[in-house]
Image (spheres, grey):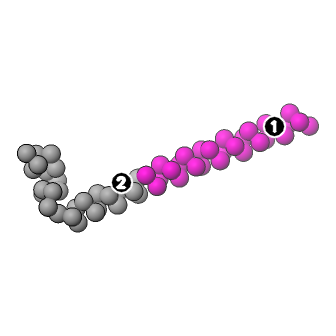
Amino acid sequence: MSEETVPQQGGAGQPKGLLQQMEELMAALNADLSALDADLQAAGSERGVVDEGQAG
């Protein structure tokens, strides 16, 4: 049954495959967080420009 759930890894007895999978997941998470950070900073700077325009 375990061979059917993870056919690409060749079974669950290969820690190198699991480590590689975890590294890929961490890289994807890093990319997502970086994109989210950029979006939040852009939204914050747009909000700051709008607030300064209304104050003056």
Q: Give the residue type at disc 2.
A: Leu
Q: Position of residue 43 (x, y in %)?
A: 66, 41
Q: Give the residue type at disc 1.
A: Asp
**The C terminus - image quarter:** top right
Please name the residue that numbered disc 2 is placed on.
25
Please name the residue that numbered disc 1 is placed on.
51
Queried whether the magenta region covers residue 24, the answer comes back as no
**26 sits left or right of 17 in the view:** right
Which residue is most to the left? Answer: 1
Residue ID at (79%, 36%)? 50
Q: Position of residue 14 (x, y in %)?
A: 17, 63
Say which element carries label 2.
helix
Residue ID at (28%, 63%)? 19
Q: Which residues are magenta?
A: 29-56
Residue ID at (86%, 33%)? 54
Q: In the depicted view, which residue is nearer to us: 41 or 22?
A: 22
